[in-house]
Amino acid sequence: MRTAAFEWLKRTIEIKGDVLSWNDLKFGFQYESEIIHLVSQQGIFKPRMLDVPLTIRTSDTGPYEDVFDQNSGLLQYAFRGSDPNHRDNSGLRQAMLESVPLIYFHAVVPSKYLVASLKPDERLERRFQEFRAF
């Protein structure tokens, strides 16, 4: 299902461009006999059929310590808050340990998101790094 989500996003971006709307992401895509949503009100989203999160969505006014590295052009996404055992952080840590790629929706204005994928960066504690746009 994760691969299908990445493929759907790639096709959608080819048609609509790099910035997608909340509605594009909320309505998602069909996988087998189910509709798979890519976002929820929570910033970290895990569809019920997966063991680890599928997507991370930021707010244009978010409180988290995400950092764009000017030298590398990469984004470092910080875990939620300071509690390493928070359920969102546990899911992200599991994704990191299993080297599972995540989809990252970066808010550029309210309800509009630039789409990228994240891979774990074991060198940076509590961080993922963006490694490619779609």
Image (spheres, rainbow, N blue to C red):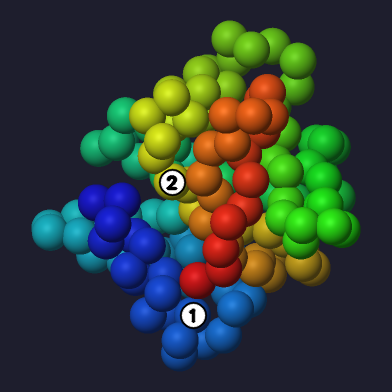
Count numbered badges in the picture: 2
Is 101 above or below relative to 72? above
Image location (x, y in percent) of residue 100: 39, 39
- Residue 52 shown left or right of residue 103 in the figure: left
Can I make out residue 88 in this image? no
- The residue that label 1 is drawn on is 13
Point out the frontmost of discs 2 and 1: 2
Query: What is the quadrant of residue 21 in the picture?
Result: bottom right
Which label's residue is closer to the chain start, 2 or 1? 1
- The residue that label 2 is drawn on is 101
Q: Looking at numbered disc 1 in the image, what kind of residue is underneath it?
A: Ile
Image location (x, y in percent) of residue 14: 45, 86
- Residue 69 shown left or right of residue 134 in the figure: right
Q: Identify the element where label 1 is drawn.
A: helix
Q: Residue at x 60, y 78 (%)?
A: 18
Q: Identify the element where label 2 is drawn.
A: loop
For this orientation, the residue located farthest to the bottom is 15
Is 27 above or below relative to 18? above
Q: Residues within 10 Å of mark 2 (few under 14, many from 20)?
A: many
Q: Looking at numbered disc 2 in the image, what kind of residue is underneath it?
A: Pro
Q: Are marks 2 and 1 in contact (CB under 8 Å)?
A: no
Can I make out residue 64 in this image? yes
Image location (x, y in percent) of residue 23: 53, 69
Image location (x, y in percent) of residue 118: 54, 49
- Residue 50 shown left or right of residue 83 in the figure: left
Is 105 above or below relative to 84? below
Determine the CA span between mark 2 and mark 1.
18 Å
Question: 91 or 20: which is nearer to us?
Answer: 91
Q: Residue at x 72, y 55 (%)?
A: 74
Query: What is the quadrant of residue 83 in the picture?
Result: top right
Label for residue 70? none
- Residue 63 shown left or right of residue 74 in the figure: right
